[in-house]
């Protein structure tokens, strides 16, 4: 019995020594704490690895991007570039907002025609003219009188589009016409001629006539006349006044009949009612043929005289139609188309 007890004690001591050398067995609470610490450590390690990878990537992008030198001031400065980026971002956000929101469409007003924008009297006068119809000379003159709506004594005008090219000298249609019934305007006429010419001009009704005394008036820039007539031999002395007289249309010209040896005849024609016409750069002739107060008879006589002059000045180089279109009108009145056959 004693021996068995001694063996048991020895076995117990050996077990105690073995247990002392082995690590203590953890409890359940200790197991949970150690597992959470391990998880936190692994998570922290993963995040650290991601941060290191992002830092390396950003560093590589910065190295690859071109380095822009910033100016001290202006658009290329740091402040200027920052403002430009903010402005661009604001514009893009505003554009996105406009795209998302549908703007209500504003009603578009219909454009009124030219006739609708005219005055009431003009529209009433326009009703007297039939659309797409051409009138004979007699009917056109009567309509010109009826469609004049102004309070003053209006002028009657003729506008003719010719099939000419004014760039060619032989097609530059130009002439003067003495209107049988006059122009209805009071014209002051000045004559620069020799002593005999001055006497003849005054007898014919010239308002101003002279030789050296007339040049003294021009030196003082006193121009109290509407037409200047000169003799051919006196034109040399008028040359230095061309810059003053030319822009006003007063420089004498043989084509307009203001340079003439017979100054008395030229004065009478100018007083009687001589008009000058010339084709413009678009091939159109514009000329007034009297006043509305003349009546239909006198206006038609003057109109026929101008048409005869236009037909007589037809260039020989014109092969097609000479007259393309013709209209008569009053001052500030509607235009009336005229039959082309009356002008051919």
Image: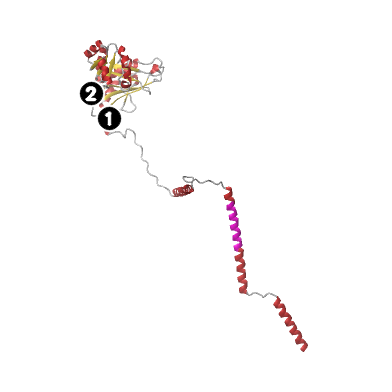
The numbered mark, 1 or 2, whose residue comes first in the sequence reads 1
Residue matched to label 1? 125
Query: Residue 332 appears at what percent x and percent y?
Result: 28, 28
Which residue corresponds to the image point at 71% horizontal and 80% vertical from the top-left? 16
Magenta stretch bounds: 43-59
Mark on residue 293?
Answer: 2
Q: Work out how far the residue at label 1 is from the one at label 2, CA to CA, in angstroms.
A: 18 Å
Which residue corresponds to the image point at 77% horizontal and 89% vertical from the top-left? 2
Query: Residue 239 appears at what percent x and percent y?
Result: 33, 17
In magenta segment, residue 47: yes
The quadrant in which the C terminus is found is top left
Asked which secondary structure carries label 2, the reply is: helix
Q: Nearer the viewer, mark 1 or mark 2?
A: 2
The quadrant in which the N terminus is found is bottom right
Task: Describe residue 104's horizontal placement relative to residue 120 as left or right.
Answer: right
Task: Describe residue 106's horizontal placement relative to residue 36 as left or right.
Answer: left
Q: Nearer the viewer, residue 338 or 311?
A: 311
Asked which secondary structure carries label 1, the reply is: helix
Query: Residue 168 appears at what percent x and percent y?
Result: 41, 18
**Res. 179 visible in picture:** no
Query: Residue 299 appears at what percent x and percent y?
Result: 26, 20
């Amino acid at each position: 019995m004693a021996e068995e007890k001694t063996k048991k004690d020895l076995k117990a001591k050996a077990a105690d020594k073995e247990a002392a050398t082995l690590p203590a067995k953890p409890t359940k609470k200790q197991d949970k704490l150690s597992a959470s610490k391990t998880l936190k450590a692994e998570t922290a390690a993963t995040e650290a690895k991601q941060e290191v990878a992002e830092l390396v990537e950003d560093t590589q992008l910065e190295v690859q991007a071109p380095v822009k030198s910033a100016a001290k001031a202006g658009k290329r400065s740091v402040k200027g570039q920052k403002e430009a980026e903010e402005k661009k971002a604001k514009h893009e956000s505003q554009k996105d907002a406009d795209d998302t929101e549908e703007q209500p469409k504003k009603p578009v007003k219909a454009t009124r025609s030219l006739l609708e924008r005219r005055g009431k009297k003009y529209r009433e006068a326009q009703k007297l003219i039939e659309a797409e119809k051409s009138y004979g000379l007699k009917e056109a003159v009567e309509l010109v009188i009826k469609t004049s709506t102004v309070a003053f004594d209006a002028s009657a005008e003729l506008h003719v589009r010719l099939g000419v090219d004014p760039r060619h000298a032989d097609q530059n249609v130009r002439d003067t016409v003495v209107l049988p019934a006059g122009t209805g305007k009071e014209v002051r006429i000045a004559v620069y001629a020799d002593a005999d010419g001055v006497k003849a001009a005054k007898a014919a009704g010239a308002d101003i006539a002279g030789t050296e005394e007339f040049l003294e008036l021009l030196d003082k820039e006193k121009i109290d006349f509407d037409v200047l007539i000169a003799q051919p031999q006196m034109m040399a002395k008028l040359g230095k006044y061309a810059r003053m007289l030319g822009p006003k249309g007063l420089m004498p010209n043989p084509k307009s009949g203001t340079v003439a040896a017979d100054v008395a005849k030229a004065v009478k024609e100018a007083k009687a009612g001589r008009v000058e016409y010339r084709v413009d750069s678009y091939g159109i002739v514009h000329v007034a043929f009297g006043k509305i107060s003349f009546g239909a008879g006198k206006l038609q006589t003057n109109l026929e005289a101008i048409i005869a002059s236009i037909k007589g000045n037809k260039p020989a180089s014109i092969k097609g139609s000479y007259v393309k279109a013709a209209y008569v009108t009053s001052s500030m009145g509607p235009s009336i188309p005229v039959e082309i056959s009356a002008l051919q």
